[in-house]
Amino acid sequence: MRLALGIRYNGRAYDGWQSQSSGRTVQDKLEAALAQFAAQPIRTLCAGRTDAGVHALMQVVHFDTTAIREPFSWARGTNRFLPDDIAVQWAHPVPDEFHCRASALARRYVYVLSQSPVRPSLDAGRVGWSMRPLDGDAMRAAAALLIGQHDFTSFRASACQARSPVKDLRRIEITRVGDGERCRWHFEFEADAFLHHMIRNLMGCLLRVGRGDAPPEWISQVLAARSRDAAAPTFSADGLYFMGPLYDAKWGLPDEATLQAGVAPYDGPP
């Protein structure tokens, strides 16, 4: 039997998603919990790997098992063995041809940024930070130049293992929550797939424009250069959330994993 799970986690305490010898990854914790609940070894595949410190609102994984349990039991039972900052949100049986990565039609991320004269405290690790005020119109103008299918080599980490740097960036939506010098910004990204560190590198460039250190048109020069040296430094992982993949409704997954619905980003105090 093949099962899909929706997972939510705070990534601050972990070395990213993918299993490592340290054992301090989300995959390691999840597979250990599943093995305890199912009384058999279980290996998972995920829809989108996340780096150290990156969070997930709706990571989707799948795995094969001979253990027979009700879907709600997979969620509640596995959560008994998980740390408090990782939780299964739902479990759903899927056909054998379903693949959490290959079946995804798109992937979505949101970067939550606090604009404030002083650094975050209660929200440390859950939001990025800009001490300087940002120009939303300038950032939106720059973001519009990135939409479409492009070679995103300038925004790609040197360790990226993707076969091609060409991705279809379908949407960047930038919204401000609150007024004055203290506010919160949400940067939502949607694409067919993303390169390693792509969003954090995009954020570095968008914030350079938002601070007035470069005009919106500069981002086109960065894109055309196809060189990581042309872009701004990689921005902090703190405020980055994997909102999850999107699937065709034919798979019968919960609404938050289909094209009809979204997941609200973290929205604590600014």
Image: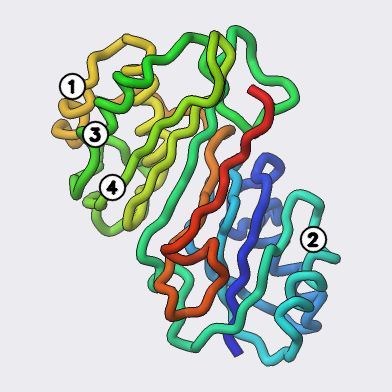
Q: Which mark is residue 217?
A: 1
Q: CA distance from mark 4 to mark 3?
A: 10 Å
98 versus 80 height, above or below: below
> Mark 3: which secondary structure?
helix
Of 22 and 97, nearer the camera is: 97
> Mark 2: which secondary structure?
loop
Q: CA distance from mark 2 to mark 1?
A: 47 Å
Is tag 1's residue or tag 3's residue first in the polypeptide sequence?
3
- What amino acid is labelled 4 in the image? Leu
Residue at image mark 3: 144
- What is the quadrant of residue 74 in the picture? bottom right
Mark 1 neighbour density, 10 Å: few (under 14) some (14–19) many (20 or more) = some
Which quarter of the rendering shows the C terminus?
top right
- What amino acid is labelled 2 in the image? Leu
Residue 49 visible in rendering: no
- What amino acid is labelled 3 in the image? Ala
Is tag 2's residue or tag 1's residue first in the polypeptide sequence?
2
Residue at image mark 4: 169
Is tag 1's residue or tag 4's residue first in the polypeptide sequence?
4
Q: CA distance from mark 1 to mark 4?
A: 18 Å
Which quarter of the rendering shows the N terminus?
bottom right
121 versus 146 height, above or below: above
Mark 4 neighbour density, 10 Å: few (under 14) some (14–19) many (20 or more) = many
Label 2 or label 1, whichever lies nearer to me, is 1
Pointers 2 and 1 in contact (C-beta within 8 Å): no
How many marks overall? Answer: 4
Label 4 or label 3, whichever lies nearer to me, is 3
Label 2 or label 3, whichever lies nearer to me, is 3
Q: CA distance from mark 2 to mark 3?
A: 41 Å
Describe residue 41's horizontal placement relative to residue 153 as left or right: right
Where is residue 197? Give x, y as percent.
41, 41
